Amino acid sequence: MDLSLFYGKNYPQEKNDRAKKLYDCFVKAEGKAPEYVLSSPGRAEILGNHTDHNHGKVMVAAINCDILCFASKTNDKSITLHSEGYPPIKTCVTDNQVNEKEYGTSTALVKGVCTKLRELGYEFGGFVAYNTSNIFKGAGVSSSAAFEVLICEIINLLYLDGKLDPVTKAIVSQYAENVFFGKPCGLLDQSGIALGSLSKLDFKNPTNPEIKTFAPPTGYTLVITNTGGDHAKLTAHYAAIRSEMEEVAGFFGKKVLREIEESEFLQNIHLLKQKFSSRAILRAIHFYNENKRVDLAEKAIEAGDNLAFLEQVSASGQSSASVLQNCYVPGQCEQPVMLAVELSKQITKKSFFRVHGGGFAGSILAFVHNDELCSYTSVMKKVFGEENVFTAQIRSTGTCGFKL
């Protein structure tokens, strides 16, 4: 089978080998060939750290790790999903009950996607699917969002004649994560995965974001390093960023910071300080400055100025560390994200770095100059483990599939 839609021309044979193994597993278990093959990529957050949930601006890229899936319709409303290395998920298209005991589970995500699609008026039946993932573990490349958008696309191809556009798939997936999975994320992850390529998204109108796509900078390789740390107990820290920004917005009678002009915010900091923590005010400052960095990065990349673009990536990382304050867990001595960023600065001269994704624990992203790639990855593997340093390429297609 030709997988160039997912992996581009001249993709390695190992991609075919992986697909054949999964295909054979489906046929052996189900006694028939699957109807569709699908792929849902991971994503790299380039700019716009923690701004999407307050309707800000971001840059995001789909990358070349993915969930590969084979799927077929069933004759009823049942859903059975087999993920390599995990017990099968069994649910029903019509199961729309939020269950807090299922927070953080794949079952919750499947139920959430189905519930939102039905709320939007779409009718569809069940399916059986087999998937395997090589999305980097613990590296903040959004395996949950890749899974959500994959479920959307399975239903889209099997039952909806491909009617769902990427933005709708992202919105449906965000709902699943917010309501059924219990994580108050914005739209960055799902949008980047659904769209593909390197994209700028302006969420001023989150149901109809402005979207632009760009060619990635040349001469650099994306390197993502998982620095360690457990995300399981960090949801409250992620949620606090959003809630603190929204509390500041509430002072002005608005729901999100994007609805308030920066000049009005700055003129009222003396009053905000009487009601809110300094950290909440700093996080609002980060929001406004991060939006400006995204605009500057857009202008730079359109002008072909790679250096100016990457300087904004680096400035974003500095703001995350000192203003947004999501590069370490408050009160803890272990600060692996900060260590990884500072080490990266010490061992390179031409490369650029920042925290990747939600922060606190997890990963950093680096645009490493190709001249420094071998030496950089060698040092980072020595410090953080060979299995925790990943090189990635930006992928042109988002979550998609085709009939076999």
Image (spheres, rainbow, N blue to C red):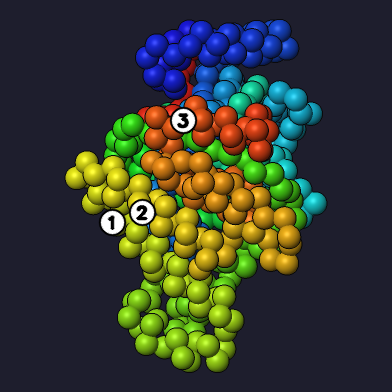
Secondary structure beneath label 2: helix
- The quarter holding residue 316 reads bottom left
Q: Amino acid at mark 3?
A: Leu
Q: Nearer the viewer, residue 146 or 328?
A: 328
Q: Nearer the viewer, residue 315 or 348?
A: 348
Label 3 sits on residue: 373
Give the residue displayed 38% in from the left and 82% down from the top: 266
Of the residues tagged 3 and 1, which is closer to the observer?
3
- Disc 1 packing (10 Å; few <14; some 14–19; many ≥20): some
Q: Position of residue 36 (x, y in %)?
A: 52, 18
Cβ–Cβ below 8 Å for labels 3 and 1?
Answer: no
Q: Nearer the viewer, residue 18 or 129?
A: 18
Report how many numbered discs are placed on residues in the image: 3
Of the residues tagged 1 and 2, which is closer to the observer?
2
Q: Amino acid at mark 1?
A: Leu
Q: Position of residue 190 (x, y in %)?
A: 50, 44
Label 1 sits on residue: 296
Q: Position of residue 210 (x, y in %)?
A: 31, 52
Residue 216 numbered mark, or none = none
Secondary structure beneath label 1: helix
Horizontal arrangement in the rendering, residue 323 relative to residue 80 (left or right): left
- 3D distance between C-alphas at marks 3 and 2: 21 Å
Give the residue displayed 34% in from the left and 59% down from the top: 293
- The quarter holding residue 78 reads top right
Label 2 sits on residue: 312
